[in-house]
Amino acid sequence: MALDPLKQFEIKPIVPIEVAGIDLSFSNASLLMVIGALLTVGFLNIGMSRRALVPGRWQAAGETLYEFIANLIKEQTGSKGREYFPFVFTIFMVVLMGNFLGMIPFSFTYTSHIIVTFALAMVVFLTVTIVGFMKHGLHFLTLFTPAGVPWPLLFLVVPIELIAYLSRPISLSIRLFANMMAGHIMLKVFAGFAVTLGVLGGIAPLLLIIALTGFEFLIAFIQAYVFAVLTCVYLKDALELH
Amino acid sequence: MEEQAARVIGAALALIPLFGVALALGNIFSTLLASIARNPSVSGELKGAGILYFALTEAIALFALLIAFLILFV
């Protein structure tokens, strides 16, 4: 194969910075994160700058995003979760921007790196745990003892629930990272096939790549949605304790 | 050479969970379709739940893929 499908995940330092032996370089991942944050803030601020009663196009787009997440939180957690809207919205936008900016050719997908998604998942996990302890105190630990379980079974159920709870950040981060990585590798490998087939295959392989790219956009959105939904589900667990 | 062969066989074996994922995805979508056909008025809610379960199930396939990559390249 002419091109290495894994090369797109390479982190290249743009401005090398090193503090006390730790590499803190401003890399292409950092650049894409800054672009994503600026796009989000710029998009919402420009859209909301006029604050018209009848929204224009930009404002309607911003309101759609807002209402999408607001409805999601209302469905999952009811009225209790309203105060966590900024948190869920930020998480959603970070993941969405990462996934969508990565779809630009020759760009970089920062959500395809396990350390980025794991950091996001740990933020969610720690927030949920802290919220749970703040709302319920030590009563929060009843999350690990489902109601109606006979007491001899608790010796079995509590460790299982504990492991399930502790593996949440791992499953949350690996789901997003593996989806993005596998999707982008698949696109590159199939593009390699199309190049190899060339004139022989005619236009059909190219059309397949276009279809796959469209599918990848769908996955990019669905994964951001799932990340937000699971954040809400975990929040609901912490707020309502089963 | 033998190690390389063992790696490839191991990576292939690591993809066996795809069988279960295929069954699960078929089950999810067939049930989703049947439910919407029976009660079209709740199709919005059902689609949201369907997408969530699709992603949760698909994650298992991706875990398997990840293990296969780890066996092959690490």
Image: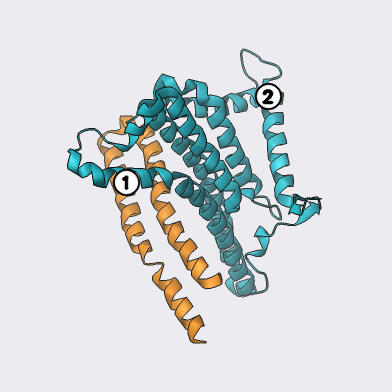
Chain colours: A cyan, B orange
- Image quarter where the N terminus of chain A lies is bottom right
- Residue type of the residue flagged with mark 1: Pro
Which residue is label 2 attached to?
A47
Comparing labels 1 and 2, the label whose residue is closer to the camera: 1
Above or below — where is B12 with respect to A128?
A: below
Spot occupied by residue A9 in the image (x, y as percentages of width and height): 65, 58
Number of dots carrying numbers: 2
Q: Residue at x 48, y 50 (%)?
A: A175
Residue lying at 51% horizontally and 21% vertically, measured from the top left = A83
Q: Name the residue carrying label 1.
A: A159
Residue B16, above or below A154: below
Q: Amino acid at mark 2?
A: Gly
Q: SS class of the residue under badge 2?
A: helix
* Front-most of residues A119 and A108: A119
Q: Earlier in the sequence, mark 1 or mark 2?
A: 2
Secondary structure state at the residue bearing disc 1: helix
Q: Are marks 1 and 2 on the same chain?
A: yes
Q: CA distance from mark 1 to mark 2?
A: 49 Å
**Badge 1: chain ID:** A
Q: Residue at x 49, y 38 (%)?
A: A125
